[in-house]
Image (tube, helix red, strand yellow):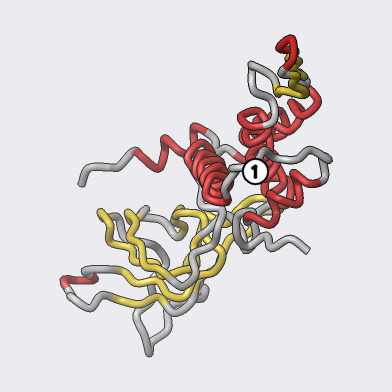
Amino acid sequence: MPDYTQWPTLKDLEDKLSATGLKLPQGTTLEYLQRQLDAVAEETERYCRRQFVPSPAPETRWFDGSGTGEIEIDEYISISSIRIVGWFGSQIGFSITHWNEVKRNRHPKTRVQIFQGSLPAFARIWIDRFPIGRNNIEVTAIWGYDSKIPADLWEAVVSEAGYRVLTETVFPSSGWLKEWQEADVLESREYLDPKKYLSWNKQFRSALKKYRKPDAVYLRKLTRTLI
């Protein structure tokens, strides 16, 4: 069973290549195969503008306060704590004890709502919104698109790595020398058609478009309100 909590490994790539029935030429190193995997995985995250491998432990990030009861943050899996930095000049800040992780079907979680009750209590300060500010909301969470990499994206990555390996090693433009005869200098070459595996590249390009973060969302996060 594939491990979808991490990108494909060398064994996953070797299994993909062995299923084709083709043999890699002698001298093809494991380091070369690993470089192909790393390059495809990095290209995937850069193009999609997303973190598909969950952070191994909770990490703290800071976001601008919205002035409303809801704030939009980076894609996350679970939140450990939320704190308002500089609350009434306090260096410690104010920790929010109740919040709601807004979930949307088939979408990563990016929104958080304050859930402090409908009426103010006499025993504590009642907060119903994230104060407007710059990097004044501290969130500690496990960040990532989901707890696992989507299966179709994972498969597309290992397929693209396999496609690049095959086109560079098994399908050279000069062809492979199939036979050699010293007397009368007979030489023949065999040309293999790589189009059979072009569908792997198409699968990868299609997955990139499917999981790319929309431009409107990406640009909105780059726009900061000057305070």
Q: Residue 126's x, y, as percent?
A: 38, 76
Q: Residue at 40% of width from left, 71% of height from top?
A: 82
Which type of secondary structure does the marked residue at label 1 adopt?
helix
- Quarter residue 123 falls in: bottom left
Q: Residue 178's x, y, as percent?
A: 77, 24
User: What type is the residue that disc 1 sits on?
Assistant: Val
Q: Residue 9's x, y, as percent?
A: 63, 56
Number of labelled discs? 1
Q: Mark 1 — residue?
A: 157
Q: Is residue 62 left or right of residue 49?
A: left
The quadrant in which the N terminus is found is: bottom right
Instruction: Give the answer, above or below, for where 98 lies relative to 179.
Output: below
Q: Nearer the viewer, residue 184 or 36?
A: 184
Q: Given the current orientation, which residue lies at the most extreme bottom position?
A: 123
Q: Given the current orientation, which residue lies at the most extreme front position?
A: 183
Q: Residue at 36% of width from left, 85% of height from top?
A: 124
Instruction: Give the answer, above or below, for where 3 lies relative to 15.
Output: below
Q: Residue 199's x, y, as percent?
A: 77, 28
Q: Residue at 30% of width from left, 76% of height from top?
A: 94
Q: Nearer the viewer, residue 163 or 55?
A: 163
Instruction: Give the answer, above or below, for where 46 lies relative to 72.
Output: above
Q: Give the class, few, some or many, for how many residues have Cα within 10 Å of label 1's Cα (few <14, many ≥20).
A: many
